[in-house]
Image (tube, grey):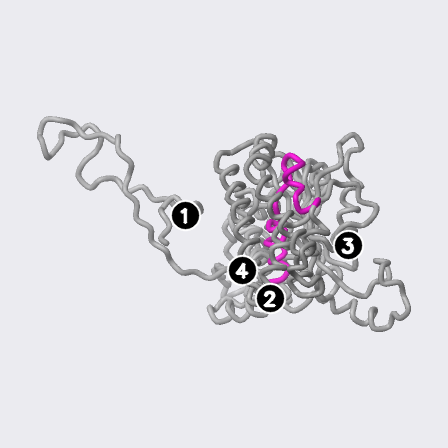
C-alpha cells in the first residue's frame, strides 16, 4: 500500500548532489571509466506535519523621539501585501469544507488548538468573498456541460434551515410543482464531453430531472439528443427531457442483493451473468476501445448473456416458479419492466452500464449533510454547490483542486473577461 515518490505531485523537490563525485569524474571503482547521470536519481520521501492554515506575524519595529514624541514605524516587506487572508486561505478552507466535509466549527477548534485561531464566521466570510471572483467560471462550465454527449443524474435529500419555516407554513400546494415543493434536494449531474467530465451540483426544490431540463436549455439546437443515465425514478425523467434514456444496471442488480438471503440460488444466477457483463466492459476499457468498437464487443460477448438472463426472468413467471408478489418476484418485475433501458449499452454507442459515477459524486453532498447537517440559507447552499462543482470537476479530470482554486483567485481580471480559458482542463 505504499505510494511511490511519483505520487507526491505537490511535494517540494530538493536535488542533492553527490558529496564527492560530479559528472565526468573518473570512476572510483574501476579507475578507468567516467561517471555520468545516465541513471535515474534515488528518491527519499519525508512527510512533515503542518497546520491547514499557517500564519506569519511581522513585528514592525517602532522608534520614538524622546523629545517630540513622534513614532517611526518600519515599513512592511513588499511581499506582505494588503490582504490578511491570501488566495491559498480561501482555497484551503473551501477544499476542507466542501471537498472533505470538514465543518467550519471543527476547523475552528483544530486551528485554535494549533495556536492559529480562525473563527467559523471568519471562514465563511473568506469563502463567500471569493465566490464573486469564481462565479464566471461556473457559468461557463455549465454552458460547456450542456453540449455534452452523455449525462448522469441523480439527487439526494438536503436541508436548508431558512426553507424549513417556509415549508411548515405551506399547505395544500401541488407537490409536483418545484415552486411549491417543500422538500429540498441536492442534484448531481455528471456531463461527459469527449475526454472531459464535468460535475455540477444544484441544491433547491427541484429534482435531478428538472435541473437537467434547465441545463439543457443552453444546449445548441443543432446537436443530437444526448444520452442520459439514471435510475428508474420518474423524478429523474420529466416529460420535457429530450434524451436517449438508459437505466442503471446496478439498481436492477440491487433488487436481487436485497433478497439474496432468502433466494440464494436464483440470485446467484443473476449475479454471475452480470459479473460477465462487467468483465467485458472492463476489458473494453483496458483495450481503450472506441464507442463503436465497445458497442460491437458488448453485442458479441454480452448480448447472448443478457438474452439468456431475459429468458430466465420471463420463465420464472411463465412457468410459475416464482410468485409475482414475492420479494424475488418484485426484483424480477423491475428488471423486466425496465429491460430496454437497462440494456441501452447493447444499442447505443457510448452508453454506460450504470450510474455509479453520479452516485460517487453525490457522496460529497452526503458527507456535507452528515457532518454539517444543513445549510443555513439558500445563499449558503449556492456557495456549497459552486465549490463542490469545481472541486469534483478537478478530481474527475486529474487536476489539483487546491492549485486550481488558488489560480482562479489570483487571476480575477483575466478570468472575468475570458472564463472559457480558465476551465480545469485548460
- Residue drawn at 50 percent across, 69 percent down: 110
Instruction: Please determine whether, in this image, residue 365 is positioned above or below residue 119.
Output: above
Question: Closest to the observer: 321 or 86?
Answer: 321
Give me the disc on residue 60: none
Question: In this rendering, does residue 236 appear at all?
Answer: yes
Labels 3 and 2 touching (C-beta < 8 A): no
Give me the disc on residue 234: 3
Instruction: Find residue 186 and report its horizontal and vertical position in percent.
Output: 70, 58
Would you name the residue on which mark 2 appears? 104
Measure the alpha-carbon separation of dots 3 and 1: 44 Å
In the picture, the quarter occupied by the C terminus is: top right
Measure the alpha-carbon separation of dots 4 and 3: 32 Å
The region drawn magenta spans: 340-367
Q: Which callout, 4 or 2, points at the residue further toward the start of the chain?
A: 2
Secondary structure, mark 3, is: helix
Tell me if 344 is positioned left or right of 260 in this view: right
Secondary structure, mark 2, is: helix
Measure the alpha-carbon separation of dots 3 and 2: 36 Å
Instruction: Find residue 146 and report its horizontal and vertical position in percent.
Output: 73, 40
Would you name the residue on which mark 4 appears? 265
Is 355 one of the magenta-colored residues?
yes
Question: Closest to the observer: 145 or 64?
Answer: 145
Would you name the residue on which mark 1 appears? 8
Q: Which corner quadrant of the image does residue 162 belong to?
A: bottom right
Measure the alpha-carbon separation of dots 1 and 2: 27 Å
Secondary structure, mark 1, is: loop
Q: Which corner quadrant of the image does residue 125 belong to?
A: bottom right
Is 306 one of the magenta-colored residues?
no
Q: Which callout, 1 or 2, points at the residue further toward the start of the chain?
A: 1
Instruction: Find residue 365 and report its horizontal and vertical position in percent.
Output: 64, 59
> Which is closer to the viewer, label 4 or label 2?
4
Amino acid at each position: 500500500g505504499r505510494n511511490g515518490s511519483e505520487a507526491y505531485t505537490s511535494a517540494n523537490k530538493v536535488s542533492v548532489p553527490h558529496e564527492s563525485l560530479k559528472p565526468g569524474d573518473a570512476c572510483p571503482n574501476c579507475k578507468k571509466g567516467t561517471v555520468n547521470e545516465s541513471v535515474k536519481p534515488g528518491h527519499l520521501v519525508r512527510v512533515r506535519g503542518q497546520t491547514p492554515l499557517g500564519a506569519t506575524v511581522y513585528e514592525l519595529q517602532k522608534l520614538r523621539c524622546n523629545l517630540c514624541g513622534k513614532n517611526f514605524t518600519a515599513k512592511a516587506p513588499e511581499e506582505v501585501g494588503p490582504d490578511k487572508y491570501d488566495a491559498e486561505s480561501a482555497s484551503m478552507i473551501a477544499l476542507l469544507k466542501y471537498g472533505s466535509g470538514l465543518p467550519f466549527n471543527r476547523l475552528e477548534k483544530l486551528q485554535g488548538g494549533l495556536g492559529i485561531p480562525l473563527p467559523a464566521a471568519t471562514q465563511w466570510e473568506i469563502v463567500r468573498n471569493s465566490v464573486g471572483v469564481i462565479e464566471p467560471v461556473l457559468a461557463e462550465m455549465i454552458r460547456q456541460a450542456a453540449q455534452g454527449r452523455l449525462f448522469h443524474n441523480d439527487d439526494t435529500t438536503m436541508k436548508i434551515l431558512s426553507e424549513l419555516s417556509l415549508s411548515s407554513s405551506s399547505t395544500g400546494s401541488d407537490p409536483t410543482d418545484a415552486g411549491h415543493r417543500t422538500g429540498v434536494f441536492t442534484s448531481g449531474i455528471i456531463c461527459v464531453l469527449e475526454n472531459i467530465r464535468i460535475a455540477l451540483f444544484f441544491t433547491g426544490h427541484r429534482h435531478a430531472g428538472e435541473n437537467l431540463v434547465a441545463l439543457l436549455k443552453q444546449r445548441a439546437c443543432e446537436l443530437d439528443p444526448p444520452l442520459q443515465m439514471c435510475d428508474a425514478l420518474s423524478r429523474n425523467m420529466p416529460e420535457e427531457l429530450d434524451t436517449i434514456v438508459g437505466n442503471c444496471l446496478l439498481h436492477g442488480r440491487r433488487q436481487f442483493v436485497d433478497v439474496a438471503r432468502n433466494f440464494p440460488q436464483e440470485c446467484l444466477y443473476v449475479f454471475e451473468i452480470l459479473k460477465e457483463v462487467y468483465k467485458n466492459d472492463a476489458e473494453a476499457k483496458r483495450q481503450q476501445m472506441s464507442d463503436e468498437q465497445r458497442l460491437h464487443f458488448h453485442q458479441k460477448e454480452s448480448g447472448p448473456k443478457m438474452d439468456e438472463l431475459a429468458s430466465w426472468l420471463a420463465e420464472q413467471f411463465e412457468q410459475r416458479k416464482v410468485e409475482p408478489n414475492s420479494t424475488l418476484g418484485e426484483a424480477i418485475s423491475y428488471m423486466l419492466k425496465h429491460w430496454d433501458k437497462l440494456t441501452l449499452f447493447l444499442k447505443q454507442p457510448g452508453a454506460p452500464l450504470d450510474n455509479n459515477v453520479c452516485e460517487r459524486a453525490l457522496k460529497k453532498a452526503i458527507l456535507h449533510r452528515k457532518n454539517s447537517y444543513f445549510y443555513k440559507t439558500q445563499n449558503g447552499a449556492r456557495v456549497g454547490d459552486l465549490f463542490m462543482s469545481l472541486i469534483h470537476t478537478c478530481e474527475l479530470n486529474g487536476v489539483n483542486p487546491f492549485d486550481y482554486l488558488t489560480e482562479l483567485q489570483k487571476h480575477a481580471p483575466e478570468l472575468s473577461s475570458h472564463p472559457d480559458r480558465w476551465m480545469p482542463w485548460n
